[in-house]
Image: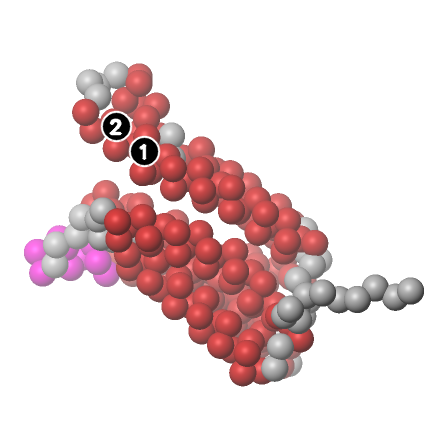
Amino acid sequence: MGTTDTRWLPPMHAWPAWGRWLAMATTGALLAAGFWLITLSGAARVLGLALLAAGIPLSVHVGRAARRERSRTVEHRYARQFMPAMLVYMVVMLYVWPMQKTMEPGLLKVAAALLPVVPIAWLIVASIRYVLGHDELERRQHLEALAIGVAIVSVASMVLGFLAAAKLIVVDASLALLLIYPALSITYGMTHCVLVWRGRAE
């Protein structure tokens, strides 16, 4: 007897064009909303972290689905490694990192302040494994996207820095530093999509 596919929804890459583009727009909205909400405080920041935790792994699958390509093992592995790391990061930022504000200067305060670096390092290792899991052409596209993303974020940082130095705007330095990695991730992901589509069109 043959097996029956009990999935109520077909794989994303098999969706009609409007469905794939709707999924991409929804993912973009999640990322944009999450990026904005984490600049706020209280419950809004918690919601922003949750939206980013959902949107960034989803963008891996949506990007391939938009090109009518099935997500491979390397994409599923990356999503599985990303989610726990992001959840650990959220817990640390919500319940551990604020404790350093009331600590006396010392090793314990340093450890509490730097604890968020651990899940971020986990994310970076997962990203490196993700890139190395592709073939030579795809690795080149990833590296080009990363280089372009770094250039974009660097120029944007310089613009904000000059405007702040001229006292035309006020920039929270600690918040600006915390936003560098999310900004790099978003610009890298968007640039990579453009490079892939351009390569397929040639």
Q: Horizontal and vertical percent for residue 2? A: 88, 66
Residue 154 visible in the shown view = no
Mark 2 Cα shell of 10 Å, populated few (<14), some (14-19), many (≥20): few
Q: Residue at x 56, y 60 (%)?
A: 60
Give the side of residue 96 with respect to residue 27, left or right: left
Residue 116 placement (x, y as % from top left) = 38, 35
Find residue 157 and report its image quarter.
bottom left
**Residue that numbered label 2 is attached to:** 99
Tell me if 148 is positioned left or right of 75 in this view.
left
- Secondary structure mostly seen in the magenta stretch: helix
Residue 80: % across, % down: 59, 47
Rendered image: mark on residue 95: 1
Q: Residues within 10 Å of mark 1 (few under 14, many from 20)?
A: few
Please tell me how many numbered marks the rendered image carries.
2
- CB under 8 Å between callouts 1 and 2? yes
Which residue type does callout 2 highlight?
A: Met
Relative depth, front residue between 186 and 2: 2
The residue under the point 64% across, 69% down is 8
Magenta segment:
159-168
The image shows residue 63, relative to residue 153, as above or below, that is below
- Residue 111 is marked as none
Q: Quadrant of the C terminus?
A: bottom right
What type is the residue that disc 1 sits on? Answer: Tyr
In the image, residue 196 lies at what x, y percent? 59, 70
Q: Residue at x 51, y 62 (%)?
A: 59
Residue 172 on the magenta span? no
Colour convention: secondary structure
Q: Is residue 176 left or right of residue 67?
A: left
Residue 162 among those drawn in magenta:
yes
Using the numbered discs, state the Cα–Cα distance from disc 1 to disc 2 in whole angstroms. 7 Å
